[in-house]
Amino acid sequence: MLEKQLLGTIKKQNLDIMKLFANALVAVILFTFGNQLLLADDVALRTGDQVSIRLAGVPAEDGAQVSGIYTVDGAGNINLPYIGKIHSSDLKQADVQSSIENAYKSSGVYTTPIITLSVQFDRLVDVEGDVRMPQRVRYTPDLTLLGAIAATGGFTDYADESKVSILRGGKRIFVNVKKVRKSTESDPGLQPGDKVSVPRSFW
């Protein structure tokens, strides 16, 4: 009899502990994902960001024509059907949604457009050419050209370090990394959507 009572007490205590653990786990998950969603809505768009835009409140055919993936261009704009360029850089997600809806209304294209905009927040920089591991490098505010190259394993033995290029917004600039290493030229900071190309030396 005593053994049964002890077993019952132990089982009850174990259940109570499991409930407490489960509740704590749920709280942590809700806190974490809630903060991520809040931060996602609060982050301003930047050049190179890719955004998914969905248009509702209009005929299905029109919605399908406008809905899609767009990129914030070098001038900070998103180019949309019928209304052209909408400035988006440095604006938050909700502000861009409102701007697009208002543009469609004011232009008389749609009377009740509903725009849903979601952003890919994994901002990336492409590094290609004669580096050891060509890949897309995750962007951080302090990412520089040398940092991006280091993240790909560095130059190969055949790389031309004097003619590394950065493509941004349709414009290409050339950097002599040898001079950067000697501190005779500055190490340029990178932006999301940049494409770094390392050519092969012909010598």
Image (cartoon, helix red, strand yellow):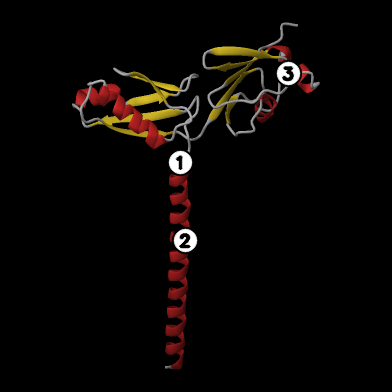
Please name the residue that numbered disc 1 is placed on: 42
Tell me which amino acid carries mark 2: Leu
Quadrant where the C terminus sits is top right
Q: Nearer the viewer, mark 3 or mark 1?
A: 1
Q: Residues within 10 Å of mark 1 (few under 14, many from 20)?
A: few
The reply, left or right, for residue 105 in relation to residue 91 is: left
Does the CB distance between marks 3 and 1 fall below 8 Å?
no
What distance separates the C-alpha of mark 3 from that of mark 1? 36 Å
Identify the secondary structure beneath mark 3: helix
Q: Nearer the viewer, residue 89 or 73?
A: 89
Could you tell which of marks 3 and 1 lies nearer the N-terminus? Answer: 1
What distance separates the C-alpha of mark 2 from that of mark 3? 49 Å
User: Which residue is at 39% across, 34% downward?
Assistant: 95
The reply, left or right, for residue 32 in relation to residue 141 is: left
User: In the image, which disc is placed on residue 188?
Assistant: none
Could you tell which of marks 2 and 3 lies nearer the N-terminus? Answer: 2
Residue 19: x %, y % from top left: 43, 70
**Which quarter of the picture shows residue 1?**
bottom left
Q: Residues within 10 Å of mark 2 (few under 14, many from 20)?
A: few
Q: Nearer the viewer, mark 2 or mark 3?
A: 3
Identify the secondary structure beneath mark 2: helix
Q: Determine the residue located farthest toward the top in the rendered image.
A: 202
Residue 58 lies, with reference to residue 201, above or below; the image says below
Identify the secondary structure beneath mark 1: helix
User: In the image, which disc is placed on residue 177?
Assistant: 3
Please name the residue that numbered disc 2 is placed on: 25
Tell me which amino acid carries mark 3: Val
Residue 94: x %, y % from top left: 38, 37
